[in-house]
Image (spheres, rainbow, N blue to C red):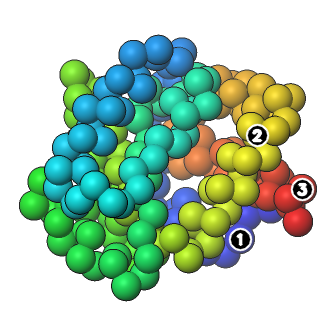
Amino acid sequence: MITPEQEKWLAHLPNNNAIRIYPYDPAAPKKFNVIKQKISDTIGKRVKIELHGAVGFGISGQGEIDIDIPVPPADFDATIGKMEKAFGQPRSLYHLQRARFVTYIKEVKAEIIVVNEECSDWTNLLKFEKYLKNHSKALNAYEKMKESAAGLSTQKYYRAKTKFINRILAKCK
């Protein structure tokens, strides 16, 4: 099941392209560390900078590095202001929820999300990842879902992914 808020988000995604899925890149964690250092130099050493997504799991994915920066709500706007100096304007911004920045390292895309640590987007991500780390069959199913989605539009890919995530989150309750 997809929530009305998720439907609204999915509707803005492209439906006339084809995504590609790549095997896990063992060099990706080193690339993450390079970007992490740049982020740390930009926003300070005390802020959490975490690797997530397919690279964090060591599975096939879209060939990008997913980086999350969870911050308290009181630090959200200031963190975004600092990030803009190093990474430009956010590609998307949901005030007091999340802001998405994009950068590249050695032609590999990195999506950097500044996220309100109290927001359900963040808490649900943590629940989802914990479940997959503790249930190898679910992690394998997630990778297979991603691989089978190769060639779908961005919208269709994220629809399938959102349904999968929602099914896992329902098991976490």
Vertical comparison of 110 with 171: above or below: above
Q: Amino acid at mark 3?
A: Lys
Q: Secondary structure at mark 3?
A: helix
Quadrant housing residue 65: top left
Identify residue type, mark 2. Leu
Evaluate if marks 2 and 3 touch, with contact meaning CB atoms under 8 Å apart. Answer: no
x%, y% of residue 11? 52, 63
First in sequence, mark 2 or 1: give its number: 1
Q: Position of residue 31 (x, y in %)?
A: 32, 26
Cα–Cα gap, marks 3 and 1? 16 Å
Q: Which residue is mark 3?
A: 171
Between circles 2 and 1, the one closer to the viewer is 2
Given residues 173 and 146, the one toward you in this image is 173
Determine which residue is flagged by label 1: 3
Disc 2 versus disc 3: distance between alpha carbons? 11 Å
Tell me, yes or no, whether the two marked residues, 2 and 1, touch with CB atoms within 8 Å.
Answer: no
Residue at coordinates 57% horizontally, 64% vertically from top-left? 122
The structure residue drawn at horizontal position 24% and vertical position 41%, both measured from the top left corner, is 37
Q: Check the picture and name the quadrant holding the N terminus.
A: bottom right
The CA span between labels 2 and 1 is 22 Å
The mark nearer the N terminus, 2 or 3, is: 2
* Residue 75 visible in this rendered orientation of the protein: yes
Q: Residues within 10 Å of mark 2 (few under 14, many from 20)?
A: some
Q: Give the residue displayed 52% in from the left and 66% down from the top.
A: 9
Vertical position of residue 58 compared to residue 47: above or below: above
What is the x, y in percent for residue 135? 85, 36
To which residue does mark 2 refer? 132
- Count of numbered circles on the image: 3
Asked whether 142 or 116 is in front, the reply is 116
Asked whether the viewer can see residue 156, the reply is no
Question: Does residue 96 sit above or below 173 in this rendering?
Answer: below
